[in-house]
Amino acid sequence: MTAFARIQESSHAWEIRSVNHRSLEIRTKIPEAIRELEASIKELTRQSLKRGYVEIFFHETPPEQVSSIEPQNLDPELLRAIKEVSKALPSKKVVSVVDVTRLMQNPNLLRARTTRTEYDLNELKLSFKSCLKQLVETRQREGQALRAIVHTSVETTRNLLKSIYDLGKEQPKLIQERLTERLRALDKHVDPNRVAQEIALLAQKSDFKEEQDRLTIHLKDVEKCLTETIPVGRRLNFLAQEILREANTLAVKAQLPACASLVIDLKVCVDQMREQVQNIE
């Protein structure tokens, strides 16, 4: 499930990103100074999430670098070398071409005083928990929206299925008329009992009551999953695949021209449902 969370503190920031994935995969990008926290934050993530490709970033605020142009901060060896070179020059006018500002910008000339931030690992863990909580809340809000979308797809599929079944009641009659018309075109006498057997066989092969029953059961199972508080993403994904398979079989058996448009709408709706459930944990 796609989500993003960020917690900004004075000295650092946690950032977590998650996208859809068939299982839970965690990647961390943290500095070596706090590497010992890696196992803990991964375990905390596993406790809160069950699916998704999760990336965890730790952004460290760059420490202030304090530089000074006071004489005591100059590198004495390098300063002595500059003086010796200056004395060795034949004229002091040559020294005037030396840009003092550029010399002072030389990192080797000045001894910069740097300060390194020391982190409290317990505080870092607490701020990470806050960031993880924010991510979970974001995923939950998206989950609620997806639940409504999938529920609407289930209702639409159920209504289309009912309409197709009602029209399908005329299918045996259509099969009989088609077969009779073909036999009439042959202008040959055929045993009526044999014709009746063929009509019954064709009607049986084109009957999609079994697919309708299975689709109805699967749709009820999807609705039940939508009421669960535990992760149901894998089960929903499997159900969506089964529903699509049954819809494809029904499309082959529904031969009435009046059913063609409804069958296409049914397959589109089921395919949209399958895409949405892949985003659910």
Image (spheres, grey):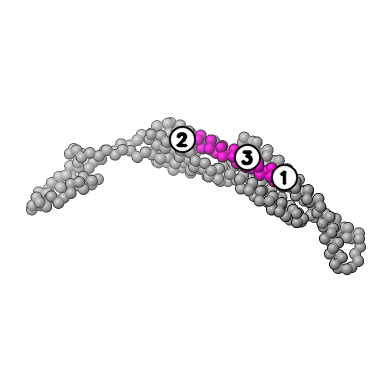
Q: Which mark is residue 159?
A: 1
Estimate the x, y position of residue 245 in percent, counting from the top left: 69, 51
Q: CA distance from mark 1 to mark 3?
A: 17 Å
Q: Which mark is residue 148?
A: 3
User: Mark 1 or 2 closer to N-term?
Assistant: 2
Q: Is residue 207 left or right of residue 41?
A: right
Q: Secondary structure at mark 3?
A: helix
- Foreground of the two, 133 or 196: 196
Residue flagged by tag 2: what amino acid is it? Phe
At 59% from the left edge and 38% from the top edge, which residue is drawn? Answer: 144
Dot 2 crowding, Cα within 10 Å, few <14, some 14–19, many 20+:
many
User: Mark 1 or 3 closer to N-term?
Assistant: 3
Q: Secondary structure at mark 2?
A: helix
Please state, as top left, top right, bottom left or bottom right, where the N terminus lies in the image.
top right
Q: Secondary structure at mark 1?
A: helix
Residue flagged by tag 3: what amino acid is it? Ala
Estimate the x, y position of residue 53 in percent, counting from the top left: 52, 44
Q: Is residue 53 left or right of residue 208?
A: left
Whether 268 is drawn above or below 145: the answer is below
Please state, as top left, top right, bottom left or bottom right, where the C terminus lies in the image.
top right
Q: Which residue is mark 2?
A: 128
Judged by depth in the image, the label closer to the viewer, 1 or 2, is: 1
Query: Which stretch appears magenta?
Result: 133-157
Residue 137 magenta-highlighted = yes
Quadrant of res 228: top right
Magenta segment, prevailing SS (helix, strand or loop): helix
Q: CA distance from mark 3 to mark 2?
A: 31 Å
